[in-house]
Structures are given as structure tokens and as C-alpha cells.
Image (cartoon, grey):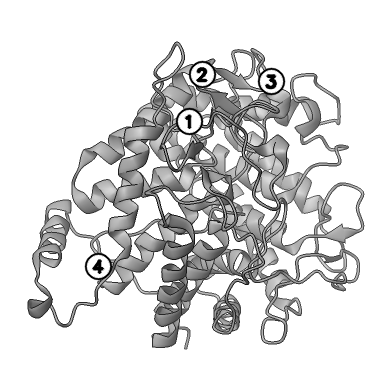
Amino acid sequence: MTRQPPRTIRVCLSCASICLLIAALASPSGAADVPSSPYLPVIYRFADAMLQHARDVHGPQKTGLMLSALDRTTLSPLTTRPTAPAGIRESDRDGPPDGPLVGANPQHDQNLLRVLYTLSELSSRPVYRDAADAELRFLLRNAASPTTSLLPWGEHMSWNVLTDRPIPDQADAPGQHEFARPWILWDRCFELEPDASKRFALGLWNHQIADHATGAFDRHAGYWKHAATDGMDFARHAGFYIRSWAVAYAHTKDQTFLTAIQTLLSRYEKKRHPTTGLIELRTGRDDASPVLSLSLAIDCDAAARLVPEPLASRLRNFANREDEIFCQLPHDLKGKGGFISSCDKATGRPDDSSLTPFWELRYGSFTTATVAMMCVSRYENTGKIGYRQLIHDAADAYLKSMPGDDLDLWPMSLGHAISLQLAAWRSTARPVHMDRARKFADYGLKTFWAGSDLPRASSKTNHYETITGSDTLALSLIELHLSILHITAVRCPPNTIDR
């Protein structure tokens, strides 16, 4: 019998606040059965420091955007360009080339925005929600390209808070537009700025897909177009687009978004190898990335819940096929502790050294815990036992691993490891997983938060820079706090967007 994930019980916010107030006021002697949690106060201090010191009050416009990098000592914008954490490309950092990191990038800060929304729900204090809303409002109203309606965010763009212009510093740079993560906040964006949100979704179609249906080059899309003949059409990006269009359709009922989804889905249906079903890493390549295809499956499943038949069934079928392929691969979690990240698309044979590592992250890579959190997403949305077994095996592998002192550890790696242990604890009730989550969390507080309310960008740097996933670690600490105190009135957002 398949054990389903526990269902979250939702109650009205006033009831949730009462429960939390009782827990907060209970003395140690009167709450012997309630475990202590040191984690939430750290996150509140982090959020308060960001609202007080990181919001943009510089340049001609006081935008309210939060800087994506800060000095941890002075809690002020950086005046130099500190050495990047290991594995980070200089071109992806949030600042002008060879200049200080004075950019705001909501995609890099997406989990921070989700943390703010959760803190408002936990505390009944609207200040956190209002700050997140202000960031989204300014971005959509003021920062979009006048030519394409695309936004200065993601892997290669940000907003310069000193000059109030996009980085790269030009009036219109749609050729640099590329998602860094799926954007999970589209529903809130449509609630706040429906017209601007729709324009972005249409721009994503008109300027990065539609103009390239026959492989034609468009100067507006530049290098990162998804043309049929383009060599950079990664499966994960297709999922980010499909999910964006599905939410846009749900809010607008504009048939253009169904056409967009059908076009991109057809492209990836045709990419499957006839024998293995694997999808090439990029057009014309002989290798496949099962992890990127798994990310696409997650977004196809989410989109299927928002669009009509028969498209919904096509999306579900696509995701189901990816489930079959991924779960049948010979992942070596019980031996070397890794998922297969690359294999031959015609044979399915894993590439040498293709197993995911426990802790080391760099551009374009995944840890075992990162991939396991994708499995958590699929398991909690489908109940498929193949994913449950992979989750358990991955979590067990981390019971014997801690980050080495020689590693420049990203907070993201630790955040995924914590959330993985909590996922295993929910489905097994084994205390060892909760104990391990707390061990990782205590290590994270000591490693990243020592000396400041802002976390380090990595274990060997001393500035704040969210590109390495401090927001992911913060989200995992809220999840751990709620689990320790058995709070179900407020649900922590799933920690599954780093893919």
C-alpha cells in the first residue's frame, strides 16, 4: 500500500495566530512536550535586516527592490566587487561587469520573497507581505523592456539600483533574458499587476519562441532564443516557459498561451529518442540530461492543472513518461550516493563521473539533495512509489555525510539537504531524519549566520550574495521550525524551485 504524503490542515489565519501565540508564550515548564526551535528568530532577524537595509533608496527612483548583495558588517550596498564564491561565473553576478554588485534580481531572491509571504502568515504582520508586493509591483510596472516586455532578471540580467537601468546597461537587452529558476509567483503577479504580467507572458512567446518556429533568427531574441535549430534549447527552460503560459492562460483565457504551450510541447515530444525516450541535452547532442527533463516534467504537470483538455492530458502524459524514464535509471544512491545526471541518449548508459555530488555546487550542476527535492515534488504530486524510494535512499545517504572544511559550501546545498531529511521524516516517521535535519541546520547557523543578521554567500566568503541560495536555506529553516513544533496551520512553500 502506498503511503501518501501527509495532508496539510488549513485553518483561518486568526486561529493560526492563536495557536502560534500560545506556543510563543508557553514557558519551558508548561510546554515540556513541545520541542524548542532556535531557527525562526534567525529568519525574522534576516528578514528585518533586509527590509531595513537592503531595500533600494538609492538613485533617481526609490524602487523598493531588494539588493541581491550587501556588506554583512555595515549592512549597506557593496562598494567593491568581492571574490565570487566557488562555482559562480562573474557574468551571472548582480552588478555591472567589473563593478560593485549593486543589482536587484527578483529571480535570485524568489525564495526570499516566499519567505516574506510566509512570515506575514506566521506573524499576522503585513509588513513582510507588503515589502514582497512592492518589489513585484515595481518590477512589473517599471522595469520591463519597452520593446519585448521581458524583465531584467534571471541568469544574465538585473536592475541597477544606482542608475535605475537594466544590467547590461542599455535601454533594451532582450537577448540576455534567461530564467534562473521557474517563476512560482505568477499568481501573485497577476493579482497585483494583471496587464503587465500578461504582457510579459506574451513577450516570452513573441520574442523568444514564436519568431523562431522555423528556426529564423530574430535580433530581439539573440543568443538565448529557443529556435528549432538553436543549440541552447534546454528542457528546464521549456518547463519554465510552459508553466508561465499556463498561469497566464488561467488568469486571462487568452488562447495565444495555449498555442504557445502546444508549440513548445510538440518540440519536446519530437525530441524523444525512439528507443530510450531520453531527450537530448541540446539540439544535435548525443547526450541527455535526465535531471533537466525531470524539471520539465514538474512544470508540465503543474501546467496540466491549469489548461483544458486535450492539452492537459498531453502534458500529463509527457510528465508520466519522464517519471518512467527517470525512476528506471540505475541511480547509485545506496553505493556512491548520487543520481545520474548525464547519459547517452541512445543507450541510456551513464557518462563517466556523471553521479551528482553531496555538497559541491557550481554553475549548471546539481547536488544529490537538489535532485532528490525534484523527486519530492513529483512524489507529493503523484504518490508514485518509485520517487518515494529514491527520496528515502538519498536521505539515507546524507545520514553519513557532512560538508568538508575544504569545500566552499553554498547555503543552497545545505537548504536542500535539510528539506530532503524533512521529506523523508514525513513519509517514514523515522526520528533519525529529523535529527539529521537539525544537525544540518545547526551547522548552517554556525557557518553562514555567525557575526551578522545576513548570511554569508558561501562558507569561505564574508559578504551577502543571494545567487548561492541563502534564501533556499532560510526557507528550509522555516520548514524545519514548523515541523519541530508540529505547526500545520501555516504551510511552508515547497523548497523545490532550484532546478
Residue under pointer 2: 162
Of callouts 4 and 2, the N-terminal one: 2
- At 91% across and 66% down in the image, what residue appears? 346
**What residue is shown with label 1?**
77
Q: Residues within 10 Å of mark 2 (few under 14, many from 20)?
A: some
The amino acid beneath tag 2 is: Leu
Q: Do the residues under discs 1 and 2 have CB atoms within 8 angstroms? A: yes
- Residue 4 visible in the picture: no
Earlier residue among tags 1 and 4: 1
At 47% across and 78% down in the image, what residue appears? 424
Give the mark, 4 or 3, whose residue is nearer the N terminus: 3
Is the Cβ of the residue at disc 1 closer than 8 Å to that at disc 4? no
Dot label at residue 487: 4
Residue 15: give x, y in percent of width and height: 12, 58
Task: Give the labeled residue for mark 3.
Answer: 173
Q: Amino acid at mark 1?
A: Pro
Q: Nearer the viewer, mark 1 or mark 3?
A: 1
Residue 148 visible in image = yes
Mark 4, secondary structure of its residue: loop
Q: Is residue 301 left or right of residue 450?
A: right
Mark 2–mark 3 contact, CB under 8 Å?
A: no
Query: At which x and y percent is residue 495?
Result: 48, 59
In percent of the image, x 33 and y 63: which residue is there?
Answer: 39
Looking at this view, is 430 or 310 the one in front?
430
Helix, strand or loop at disc 3? loop
Q: Amino acid at mark 4?
A: Ile
